[in-house]
Amino acid sequence: MKPSLPKGTRDFAAAEVAKRKYIIQILQKNFEVFGFQPLETPSFENLSTLTGKYGEEGDRLIFKILNSGDYLDKIPDEELGLKNYKSLTPRIADKALRYDLTVPFARFVAMNSGLLAFPFKRYQIQPVWRADRPQKGRFREFYQCDADVVGSESLWQEVELVLLYLKSFSDLKIPVKIQINNRKILSGLAEFAGISEQITDFTVALDKLDKIGKDGVVRELQEKNIPSEAIAKLDFLFENKPWEEVLSALKQKFQNIEIGKTGVEELEFVLENCKKLTQTQGINEKNIVFNITLARGLDYYTGAIFEVTAENVEMGSVGGGGRYDNLTEVFGVKNVPGIGISFGLDRIYLVMQELNLFPENTENPIEYLFANYGEKEALKSLEIIAKLRAKGISAELYPEAGKMKKFFTYSEKRGVKNLVFIGEEEIKNDTVTIKNQETGEQIVVPTDEFL
Amino acid sequence: MKPSLPKGTRDFAAAEVAKRKYIIQILQKNFEVFGFQPLETPSFENLSTLTGKYGEEGDRLIFKILNSGDYLDKIPDEELGLKNYKSLTPRIADKALRYDLTVPFARFVAMNSGLLAFPFKRYQIQPVWRADRPQKGRFREFYQCDADVVGSESLWQEVELVLLYLKSFSDLKIPVKIQINNRKILSGLAEFAGISEQITDFTVALDKLDKIGKDGVVRELQEKNIPSEAIAKLDFLFENKPWEEVLSALKQKFQNIEIGKTGVEELEFVLENCKKLTQTQGINEKNIVFNITLARGLDYYTGAIFEVTAENVEMGSVGGGGRYDNLTEVFGVKNVPGIGISFGLDRIYLVMQELNLFPENTENPIEYLFANYGEKEALKSLEIIAKLRAKGISAELYPEAGKMKKFFTYSEKRGVKNLVFIGEEEIKNDTVTIKNQETGEQIVVPTDEFL
């Protein structure tokens, strides 16, 4: 009988909706001035569209939707008797909730590739669902805000997306650091150390340098059976040197390693052009840094990778993304390279709460609440209210006639800005009595003048 | 390999998103000036929250979400062997997708009743999901836009919601007729004819008067074993008389039928006050009519019921709603009467398409697309682009250097308003060359002047 919310989900009441909308509108505006077009995809996809795209763990976290009707009808008794839920699932659930915005976008591009103008720039702001264990800042339903460009290999896209991050976070007034790395540099390093087969072990360990320090990283590499000569060759990475030094060391070591050399060139193109462009815009170039330890989902990305962290607050990343060579190949459409970034709405919300960055007036309280003295007065009030509303001003009549105490309680709970009283006297004189709730000032003015 | 969309779902590309947003923003604006506050609830609820609220057919159409992990583990073999999907469903699926916005709203009010300021006025614009057979204008994922007031029995709410309908549809420029009836009048009629037990059969048949005419209705009543004396007593309803005549006939017949008398009084209060208020607002009062055949979901409503149909187009209803006595009783919170209306976004969209009511500029095409002649020119272009974007003007750089043919194709496909060329000459002179795509006019202006 007593209702509750499913684990990991939330209701958003007026104040939260208003704040979330404030963030979304800033992101949306920036996506649009950067030339991105909106896309909305359905909340559920065919299960087969999603399965196998997010790794085994991801597949497990996808919410599946039970088929309607008698979903057991076509399952043979023997099969059911095996009680193997993994093999049964796709037989009784052929749809699943969106797990991210990238795979539905890839599915859309594959289905419409003949119709789209490439480079195709889309943004998408929609909820996604994951059957993850809920914890602080992690929910089972949450919003992603993505911008992707597909059909172009130009490195100007990398530059553009960094600028999009900078401008959006600057508009939100969140101080951020944008960390950049390049998948090709990581591949080059693995090649340089002769451990190309173990690139994932290597980058996963390197990614922890911040947390576990040089000794921790070396220990983890040893545990993963990375040869000590290889570790020695990579030693220059573990010293937390300024990134400019790391970069020049890399250039030296990559003289005969093509992929590494390309990675460095790509990185420098992005860093240098971002630097030039931020200078003309009064943005501090120090906010864009090369971070060799940044790894992200390696299987997916093939070039630049990004991660954005908010400064002055402990929150983890508030955004991330990177370049990929083949977005739609898995759906049978080849040669659609692209690059995308994501903004984490829920984390951004928490950062803004913590740093007190929301403007005071995100919520629109009622401008005028009219008291109700009876049918004739209410009718007169509604006539005036209609005229206020036509001007875009929020106004309402308190519904219960004569209940003045309740009227005042309601007006306070709702944070109404002005109270309006229209009684017999006011009708006779064609006036309204207005009380400003902030100043307490009360005035009587002719109706026409008020309007 | 070849991807597809699940049955009854749709992608919305840029043009559709823009048009849908146009409608949503008008509704949202009106909800807010009428004093409604936004609410968003999670996409899925506990299955038990939804089950039993929409009738047997409704329960069938709810999309259930399969539990994660080994959902078969706790099901005894014997139970599984029965292959009874109806009893198995709640054991393997404890969550379900939102079926409408009213039950989640009731759940929210029940969970937060101590905190809310009553009358609580909320609006909610979110998708809902139904495992219905898809057909023209009916989808498995579609948006509802609801406004409800709970905690007030005042009939001014009925008046307000009619005004909200009128103002919203007037802002959308959709000509509509608002049909009003009252559940108490239908109860009074059943009592008057001595068929209170068969009220549903009676109203279901009466509801078809438009389509099957008097003979059809009478035949259906006979088939449902409604006595011929009762049918004779109700005969005055079946003549398609002007509603004013029906109303005065009702007043006569309800002299000793309390519920019917109350229904007529409520209806007259709403009609009369709406009439007075529409007069002062230049709205044609003819658009508000009493329709005795209007039934809607009788189990749910207890007072006024509304239905809105668009004129000059075959579309069925574009909105509906009514008063209910007990929204939250099923969740253990009593005495929360209320009234709500709903706008059907998808139907409204189709009507506006058919009547050509969308303004031409809903979509924001790119204002300035910059050609790309190489690195130096691109960088200069991006400097100017950043300044345009800072002013809220959409602008982008074509990413591939030198590919002029592709540049022109892209600009046409995207419907770009102006092309901008910055080559060697322009850099030397600090000018930009702008081509207006509509007029074909091409001019050279100093960069400063352009900005």
Image (tube, coloured by chain):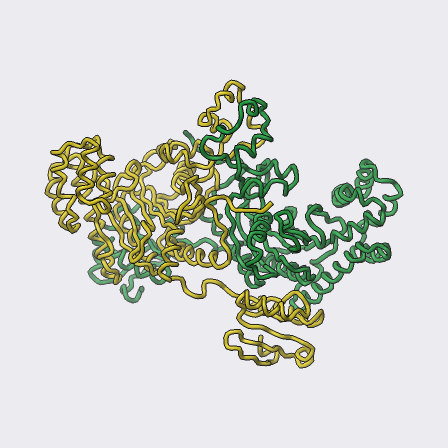
Chain colours: A yellow, B green
Q: Position of residue B308 (x, y in %)?
A: 66, 52
Residue at 52%, 43% (x, y): give it: B44
Residue at 22%, 59% (x, y): give it: B427
Q: Position of residue B287 (x, y in %)?
A: 69, 58
Q: Which residue is situated farthest in the top direction here?
A: A78
Q: Is residue B10 visible?
A: yes
Q: State left or right for residue B289 relative to residue A64.
A: right
Residue at 41%, 64% (x, y): give it: A359
Residue at 60%, 59% (x, y): give it: B170
Q: Position of residue A220 (x, y in %)?
A: 21, 37
| Residue placed most toward the observer, B380 or A64 | A64
Q: State left or right for residue A304 relative to residue A433.
A: left
Q: Which residue is situated farthest in the right direction here?
A: B229
Q: Quadrant of residue A443?
A: bottom right
* Quarter the C terminus of chain A occupies: bottom right
| Residue placed most toward the observer, B337 or B355 | B337
**In the rendered image, the vertical position of residue B242 relative to residue A64, given as above or below:** below
In this rendering, the count of numbered labels is: 0
Q: State left or right for residue B305 relative to residue B450.
A: right
**In the rendered image, the vertical position of residue A291 relative to residue B386, given as above or below:** above
Q: Quadrant of residue A357?
A: bottom left
Q: Is residue A113 visible?
A: no
Q: Position of residue B19 (x, y in %)?
A: 50, 51
Q: Quadrant of residue A173?
A: bottom left
* Quarter the N terminus of chain A occupies: top right
